[in-house]
Image (cartoon, rainbow, N blue to C red):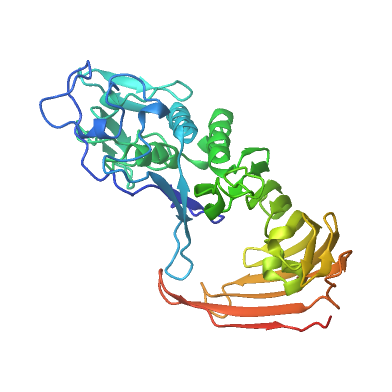
Amino acid sequence: MPYVANRERLSIYTEDGFQTSVKLPTSPTGNPSTIANATLEYLLPNSSTALPLTGNEILLNDRYGRTNTLRVKTSGSTSSNFVETKILLDRKDTQALVQLANEARRAKAYIYTNRDGVSVSKIAGQYDIININDTASRTYTAVNAIGTTVTNFGASGSGLVVTPGGYVTNPTIYNNVINYLIAEYGSLSETQRKYGFVQNSANKFMGKLGAKGFGMDGVSFGIAYLANEADAVAPDASNSMTQGWFGADTRFRLPVQLAWQSKDKKWLASANYAFERGNNSMGQVGTQLALTPFMYASLNESNQFGFTLAYQWSPDFSITGAYGHASVNARYDNSVMGVKMADAGDSAVMNSWMVALNFKNVFLKGNSAGFAIGGVPSLVSNSAGWNKDGGMPTALETWYQFQVTDNISITPGIFYISSTTN
């Protein structure tokens, strides 16, 4: 009976570069053969294909300098709901992926003939650590889709083949080490994926991919430092207000985020904080006074807080709410044509809010729509003489997206914002 997935799944693969066919040495020692050894293009030059594979042996860039990224898309998607994301890999990611593939092989039971012609029966629960030289030169015995026992579908030295013993028998010859590692896990049955050692390894791998800083048990934390390019790259040492990466007047932003997602992926919450000097990003999408509470943006030094809560009500409907608050201080005294507008230390406060509804498969499968309403970031108090907003403008937005093809969509929308008086 064919297997039918009871939930939406993701496909993970890589395709940038790494397209050369794999040719492996045939000697047990793993010494390079007389032909070009393309596998070593993916591994470090001093790697031995006769030793267990480790993540450090997988290059993060191919021989042409192209970045090795994972692509993530909805499994079994049609042209109307195709979604793809790219994820950059690091050394920890590749090591976690090697470990996941090893645990996937551990979960399976299979029979193979090694390079010496000896038949080996590998039982479930027993490790069969990945050794690229041996993995590519085995002959496997398995049952195909129609129930017939087949043999001799190994790579025979020309590539990498997924070990049988899972839900899917995969005789595809892989010339990409990372795709092969992912496929080892992908061939498992639902029961095998629930084995403790497999599940733990899968969680570690996905956790490595999902953190901006670090993540555990649905919680992630991220921090960054973003300096203005003109200030940081070309500091003017002859200027009394010397700049640079951390100069006295460098414009920069220091964002911090703490996020949580429930195990069923329905709830998502995040708390955000940012310290910013020289500009106010929150005000850049708000009123003019929110952008320049003290006449000049260069005077701003702000502490910004944001909170977001999202709920996936159903596969086709989600709701998101957000609130923002910022306290801005004046860095220097300021006057306009001799009239004082702000003293150093003067403060201003701004607020904003938003509620958004998102719908999938509206009228036609793959088409989506959304509606949002919110209060535009506006100044609610200002101890300086540069005034405050008379009220908070309301913004409304609605849109509908026609997905024409995988790569083309048309999204007409309506946007309205009310005015406010000072």
For the point 43% across and 30% down, the residue is 98
* Left or right, residue 114 beside residue 254: left
Task: Tell me if residue 51 comes above or below residue 283 in the rendering.
Answer: above
Asked which quadrant contains residue 380, the reply is bottom right
Residue at image x 39%, y 22%?
Answer: 128
The location of residue 33, given as percent across then percent down, is 14, 24
Question: Could you say where residue 106 lies in the image, as x and y percent from the top left?
Answer: 45, 26
Query: In the picture, residue 419 is in which quadrant?
Result: bottom right
- Which image quadrant for residue 377? bottom right
Give the answer, above or below, for where 96 lies relative to 358.
above
Query: Which residue is at a point 73% across and 52% down the rendered structure image?
Result: 269
Which residue: 70% across, 63% down?
297
Whole-percent x and y of residue 278?
Answer: 68, 56
- Whether residue 132 sits left or right of residue 329 in the image: it is left
Would residue 401 be found to the left or right of residue 341 on screen?
Answer: left
Give 93 or 82, whichever is nearer the viewer.
93
In the picture provided, is 310 more to the left or to the right than 116? Answer: right
Count of numbered labels shown in the rendering: 0
